[in-house]
Image (cartoon, rainbow, N blue to C red):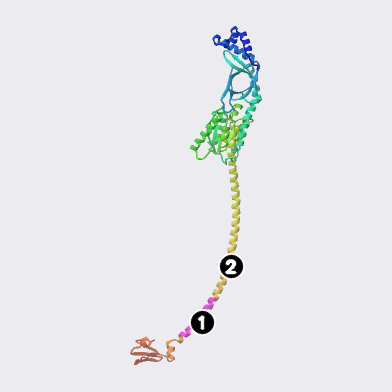
């Protein structure tokens, strides 16, 4: 860029109008001699200065704040922001004319895989243009696709490095996969094509009362995308806490479709950190097979499309169902084997008990026979002994019969017809029975034994 001095400006103004030379002469330093010019003359001079001074295009870094396409022409608003505050410190209008737009934009999008749109940081070759009627703007003559890719990649790596240094990047990945997926919170753009694909299978699961889905919408494009997703997730979890006693088994974030460069809006540290700290596994399906976002890096599971997310949920449910069936069959098989083993063991025990019982009965029967024989023997001995004893008693009884006793010379003393066993029973008269008769006597004296 050439340095403009007063002599060059004077030359330009002289070529335009005669009074322009007067306007830039030393006499203008004195206020009383200041001339008056028309706006068109003044701006025309500025136009010529800019045309001559900025006649070569230069490479400039800027952010596309806005972009509109009319009649094949691209109308942009460029800006530069302070790094820390995002305050705009410079801005201007820019144009890509129709006759160069198709080739230039197609080349950029083919090389970068990114659609030219607002909020992109770009390195563009521009040439200044000033029009007295429409003001200052620049014409864009080329776009460096490598710079935009590098800027996106640089921000991506910075976020990933920060999450790694803070120990957040693997937190959600380390959560166990739910044993059974029954309740799912879904965050998606409203009326998105990918959401429709997701809901086809999700509705079937919901109708079968296998898994229930609760949907909340968010914006996935533009600078507000990350904030919108965070707000949707927070409000969704608050509502969930009111409606359910347990947290969801999964949080699903799906997008599906849309421009590839819209993925850059999802590369946000605050959003990624929030998701990392969730205690519920997060599955994402952003909708592009080749391009990844920070959400893919930190999610518990990442899928290419929303359709694959619901397929993953369906597969987990199917696998768990199959696991249950396999375990049930195994339990049945083991139970049958155990029952058979117990039956066999029981049969062995029964046979053993039966054998031992028969042996016990045989032994008891033998003991009983022996006891019976012994009892019979002892009974006979007892009977014999008793018979002998009875005979002895009978002989003794017979010997002690009063008649036998009387025959031996003994007598029975009676008093008042009662046998006398003591002198105290004797009264004045007694009767004495002898073998051959009775003696009645009067008692004169009773003498006690000393």
Q: Which mark is residue 441?
A: none
Residue 402 placement (x, y as % from top left):
42, 87
Which residue is nearer to you in this view: 364 or 283? 283
Q: Is residue 74 visible?
A: no
Residue 165 placement (x, y as % from top left):
61, 36
Membership of 153 in magenta stretch: no
Q: Which mark is residue 363?
A: 2
The residue beneath circle 1 is 388
Residue 297 placement (x, y as % from top left):
61, 34
Quick one: label 2 or label 1, which is nearer the N terminus? 2
Q: Is residue 403 visible?
A: yes
Magenta stretch: dominant secondary structure: helix
Q: Is residue 227 left or right of residue 60?
A: left
Quadrant of the image containing the N terminus: top right
Tag 1 secondary structure: helix
Which residue is nearer to you in this view: 175 or 91? 91
Residue 73 vertical placement versus 350 (above, below)? above
Quadrant of the image containing the C terminus: bottom left
| CA distance separating discs 2 and 1 | 37 Å
Tag 2 secondary structure: helix
Which residue is nearer to you in this view: 206 or 289? 289
Residue 379 vertical placement versus 43 (above, below)? below
Residue 357 vertical placement versus 157 (above, below)? below
Membership of 386 in magenta stretch: yes
Which residue is nearer to you in this view: 310 or 289? 289
Q: Residue at x 54, y 78 (%)?
A: 381
Task: Place residue 416 in its image quadrant.
Answer: bottom left
Residue 428 placement (x, y as % from top left):
33, 90
Bounds of the magenta segment: 378-397
Check contact, mark 2 vs mark 1: CB within 8 A.
Answer: no
């Amino acid at each position: 860029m050439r340095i403009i001095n007063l002599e060059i400006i004077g030359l330009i103004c002289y070529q335009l109008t005669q009074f322009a030379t007067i306007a830039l002469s030393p006499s203008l330093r004195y206020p009383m001699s200041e001339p008056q010019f028309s706006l068109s003359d003044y701006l025309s001079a500025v136009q010529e200065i800019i045309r001559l001074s900025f006649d070569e295009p230069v490479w400039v870094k800027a952010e596309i704040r806005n972009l509109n396409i009319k009649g094949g022409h691209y109308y942009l608003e460029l800006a530069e922001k302070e790094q820390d505050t995002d305050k705009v410190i410079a801005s201007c209008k820019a144009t890509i004319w129709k006759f160069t737009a198709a080739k230039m934009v197609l080349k950029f999008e083919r090389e970068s895989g990114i659609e030219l749109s607002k909020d992109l940081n770009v390195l563009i070759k521009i040439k200044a243009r000033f029009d007295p009627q429409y003001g200052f703007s620049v014409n864009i003559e080329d776009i460096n696709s490598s710079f935009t890719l590098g800027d996106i990649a640089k921000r991506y790596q910075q976020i990933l490095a920060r999450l790694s240094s803070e120990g957040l990047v693997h937190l959600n990945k380390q959560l166990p996969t739910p044993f059974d997926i029954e309740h799912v919170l879904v965050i998606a753009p409203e009326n998105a094509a990918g959401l429709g694909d997701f809901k086809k299978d999700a509705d079937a699961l919901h109708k079968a009362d296998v898994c229930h889905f609760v949907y909340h919408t968010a914006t996935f494009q533009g600078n507000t995308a990350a904030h919108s997703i965070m707000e949707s997730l927070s409000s969704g979890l608050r509502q969930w806490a009111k409606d359910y006693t347990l947290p969801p088994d999964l949080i699903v974030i799906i997008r599906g479709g849309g421009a590839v460069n819209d993925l850059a809006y999802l590369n946000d540290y605050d959003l990624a950190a929030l998701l990392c700290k969730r205690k519920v596994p997060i599955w994402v399906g952003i909708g592009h097979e080749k391009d990844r976002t920070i959400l893919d890096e930190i999610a518990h599971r990442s899928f290419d499309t929303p359709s694959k997310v619901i397929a993953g949920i369906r597969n987990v449910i199917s696998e768990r169902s199959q696991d249950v069936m396999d375990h049930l069959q195994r339990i049945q098989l083991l139970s049958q084997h155990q029952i058979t083993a117990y039956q066999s063991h029981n049969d062995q025990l029964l046979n053993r008990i039966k054998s031992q019982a028969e042996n016990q009965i045989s032994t008891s029967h033998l003991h009983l026979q022996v006891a019976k024989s012994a009892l019979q023997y002892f009974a006979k001995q007892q009977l014999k002994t008793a018979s002998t004893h009875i005979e002895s008693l009978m002989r003794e009884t017979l010997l002690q019969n009063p008649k036998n006793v009387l025959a031996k010379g003994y007598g029975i003393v009676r008093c008042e017809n009662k046998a006398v066993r003591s002198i105290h029973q004797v009264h004045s008269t007694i009767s004495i029975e002898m073998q051959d008769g009775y003696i009645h006597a009067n008692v004169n004296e009773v003498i006690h034994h000393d």
